[in-house]
Each structure stands twice: as C-alpha cells, then as structure tokens.
Image (cartoon, rainbow, N blue to C red):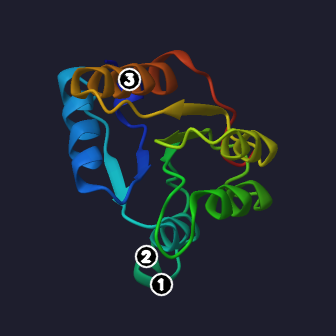
C-alpha cells in the first residue's frame, strides 16, 4: 500500500473484543498497516470524533478516513453515533460503514436513512469475517475517493 494510503486512520467502533481482534488480524493479513483507533462503545467514539471527555485536546484536524461502526453498542448505540456524525459539519462527509450482525431490515433502513455509506453483515464464519474485513479495508482506504473532511 502506498504511503498516502498508510496515513489514513480507521475508526473501529466495536464492543466485541473477538470481532475487534479478527478485524485487526484481517487488516494485517491484507497488508493494511493504517492506524486503527478502537472505541468499544458509542460514547467513546463520539468523544474521539469531537475531542471531548477522555479524548479532550485531541487534534481534530486528524479525522478517520473511514468509520467501521457496529450498531449494537453500549452507552450510545450505533444509530445515534451515525446521526451525530452526519449532523456535524466536521464529520458529515466521513464514510461510515455499518458493520453489524443485525439481520433486522429496520436497522438497515435506519442506517441508510441516517446516511450510512454501506451496510455489511458480519459473518459468524471466521474465514468469511476475515475476508470481509480485508475487502472493507482495501475498498475504503485504496479504491474509494472520499471528499475532504471539511468539504
């Protein structure tokens, strides 16, 4: 991967430690060496994005290139995180991929209605989950051309 792509930060918002580890393993296996910021609940993700709470003072000029967002999160659920991301001009254009086990059509519709760029169901099969994570990383970091964060 080029140096330009290596500087792109991934925000992974996932409360399940096994799913976090699998995603990191998949990125490493695909030679995706980008920094991955991990938030284990929706509140922490919002604090990171908006430099509040535990992340107060963080340089908000460095924003994630893509957010991989679980829906079923403690404290603040994924749909509320997505809603707040899209409501703020600083984060409005960051691509958000909903990465969830939910098979509920209402979750898919709500995600797209709130501005998700993609909705991907996590596979319970280990090898498929690894491959899905690898493809997500390559697409959103290498192929996709996102607008500037402050478009």
Q: In front: 109, or 62?
A: 109
Crowding near pointer 3: few (<14 within 10 Å), some, many (20+)? some
Which quadrant, please, contains the C terminus? top right
Q: Earlier in the sequence, mark 2 or mark 3?
A: 2
Kindly report the distance in space between the C-alpha atoms of the residues bearing marks 2 and 3. Answer: 30 Å
Crowding near pointer 2: few (<14 within 10 Å), some, many (20+)? some
Q: Which mark is residue 53?
A: 1
Q: Is residue 80 above or below residue 91?
A: below
- Give the residue displayed 75% in from the left and 54% down from the top: 86
Q: Is residue 130 above or below residue 86?
A: above
Q: Position of residue 66 (x, y in %)?
A: 52, 40
Residue 97, by quadrant, is: top right
Judged from the image, the secondary structure of the residue bearing numbered disc 3 is helix
Kindly report the distance in space between the C-alpha atoms of the residues bearing marks 2 and 1. Answer: 5 Å
Tag 2 residue: 55
Tag 3 residue: 132
Confirm or deny contact between disc 2 and disc 1 (CB under 8 A). Answer: yes
Which quadrant, please, contains the N terminus? top left
- Give the residue displayed 62% in from the left and 31% down from the top: 118
- Give the residue displayed 32% in from the left and 33% down from the top: 124
Q: Is residue 88 above or below residue 67?
A: below
């Amino acid at each position: 991967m080029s140096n330009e792509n290596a500087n792109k930060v991934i925000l992974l918002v996932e409360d399940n430690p096994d799913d976090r580890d699998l995603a990191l393993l998949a990125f490493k296996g695909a030679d995706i060496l980008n920094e991955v910021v991990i938030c284990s609940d929706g509140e922490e993700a919002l604090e990171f994005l908006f430099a509040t709470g535990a992340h107060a003072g963080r340089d908000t000029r460095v924003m994630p290139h893509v957010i991989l967002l679980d829906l079923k999160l403690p404290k603040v659920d994924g749909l509320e995180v997505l809603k707040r991301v899209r409501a703020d001009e600083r984060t409005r254009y960051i691509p958000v991929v909903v990465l969830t086990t939910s098979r509920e059509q209402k979750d898919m519709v709500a995600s797209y209605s709130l501005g998700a760029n993609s909705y991907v169901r996590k596979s319970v099969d280990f090898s498929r989950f690894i491959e899905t994570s690898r493809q997500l990383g390559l697409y959103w970091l290498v192929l996709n051309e996102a607008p500037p964060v402050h478009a």
